[in-house]
Every structure is written in structure tokens, then in C-alpha cells.
Image: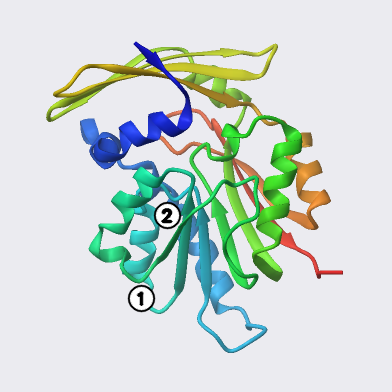
Amino acid sequence: MSEGGGADLYAALAPIYDDWQASDGMTPFALVTAARLAPVLEREAAAPAPLPRPFSFLEIGCGTGTLLGALRAAQPTWRLAGADASAAMLGVAAGKPGLRRVALARARLEQPLPFARGFDVAGVFYDTLNHLADPPALARAFAALSDVLRPGGLLVFDVTNLLGFERWWRGRNEFSGRRWRISVDARFDPTSRLGRAEVTIAGEERARSFHLIERYLSSADIRGGLTSAGFTVERTEGWAPFTNDVEGKTWWVARLGPKS
């Protein structure tokens, strides 16, 4: 049977998510991202700080906390926090010993975030922004992020670009592990700029299917949203997170200007 969208899908994925990300010898995307992100954070942490306090990083769409766990292991003195819309994914994250000193909260990205202003860097990765419904929702998300960063703070994120949708959102992919199987049947419509996938998860109980929709966000959409929220783009570049694959992701770095 087919069920609803994102919330139900991620509740079903949560118990097997980490196994899925590491299946078939894959390096979890969160660890690939952590390796690319770490030098950016280290440079920011080494810069003169406005106030004498621990360097701080907030991840939105943190899922089961794998990226935050990698950062905590490498940088035990940093102040780390994460938010996700899925209570089930956060429940898995909260149960990991390495995340006991990481603040976790449930939140939707396009709404005000439950954190006080003052983070040095915020990050949003792995299609989190592609889940947003339209450019106005993207602008609201950037505004919410600007409200939790300090003036001069950095925003780092990735999105699936047009090449990525054309390359990865087509056909069927199968994954399996102990007592579970995942099938993803995806397609991308360049006219509507929407990627649609039917995700089927089979375990010891009945198989369940879910609809997933993601949106291609143009560079103009992203730059417009960033500008309206007070950010200035410092760098943008194509990124191939998978070995010997296309640069189907775009990596963005933007800095928040002074608050008026």
C-alpha cells in the first residue's frame, strides 16, 4: 500500500537508516559531508572570535546525528546542536553515546528555529533544502537560519543540482541488509522541476510504500533567498560526493551580514 510523504517515510527509515547508509560498502553521506565540512569549520574556529566562548555549530536536518557524532569525536570542546523534523530520527540520534552532549531539537526548517542567536556556523545537507516546496519556502528557511547565527556567521549547505536530478532520479535502486530491503523508484520531471520517488521498505512485517517529492532549486532561487535573508555568497562549486560520479551536488558557503 502507499502512504503519505516525508514524516511517515522518515519514521519508517529511522530504525534502519544507519544500516542503509552503510550498506553495500557505502560510506554514509553524513561522513562524506563531515570530511568536506571539517576544514571549513576549523578555519572559522581559528579566526578571532567576537566573544571568548566555545566555537559553535548547528546542523539542520541532522537525522540520526552521524555528522554531529563525527564532529564531536574530533572536536570535543565545540558546542554542537542539531535539529530535524522527524521525531523518530532524533530518537535514534539521542540514543547514541557520542551525542549525549549535543543539543537536539525537533524543528521544521522553514519555521522559526528553537535556538537562541549566536551560532558561528550552521549547516544544511543531504537534500534537506530540496524538500522545500517552493522559492518562498526557501527564503523563509534562510531567514530562520539568519536568526540563529551571529552577525558574520557562516552558512554552509548543499543542494542536488539539475545534473544530480537527471543522473540520480531515474529508474529503480535496491538496497538490502539484515531483515530489511529498500526499493527506490525515482523519476525527474524537468518541466515541473520535481523529483518524485516511490520508496518501499520491507522488513519482518508488511512492506510499506511512501511517496517522496524533492524540488530542483535554481541558482537564482538560492541567491535570491540568501540575499533577502542578509547573506552574501562567498563560494559555490559543484561537488561529486560519490566516487567516479558526476558533480550532482552544489556546495554553497554564505556569510551573514550585520544585523540592522
Relative to the observer, which residue lies in front, 178 or 250? 178
**Rendered position, 212 above or below 220:** above
Q: Using residue 74 as the reference point, say whether residue 38 is left or right of it.
A: right
Q: Is residue 22 visible?
A: no
How many residues crowd mark 2 within 10 Å: few (<14), some (14–19), many (20+)?
Answer: some
Residue drawn where x is 44% and y is 75% of the image: 78
- Give above or below for 136 relative to 171: below
Using the image, determine if residue 114 lies above or below residue 26.
below
How far from the left and from the top, in percent, is residue 9? Answer: 39, 29
Choose the circle earlier in sequence order: 1 or 2: 2
- Quadrant (top left/top right/bottom left/bottom right) for the C terminus: bottom right
For residue 34, the mark is 2
Amino acid type of the residue that numbered disc 2 sits on in the rendered structure = Ala
**Mark 1 lies on residue:** 76
Q: Position of residue 8 (x, y in %)?
A: 40, 30
Of the 4 image quadrants, the one containing the N terminus is top left
Residue 4: x and y, percent? Answer: 45, 22
Q: Residues within 10 Å of mark 1 (few under 14, many from 20)?
A: few
Residue nearest the viewer, comparing 92 with 59: 92
Query: Residue at coordinates 36% horizontally, 53% vertically from top-left?
Result: 65
Quadrant housing residue 21: top left
Q: Secondary structure at mark 2?
A: helix
From the image, state whether disc 1 or disc 2 is nearer to you: 1
Which of the 4 quarters of the picture holds residue 205? top left
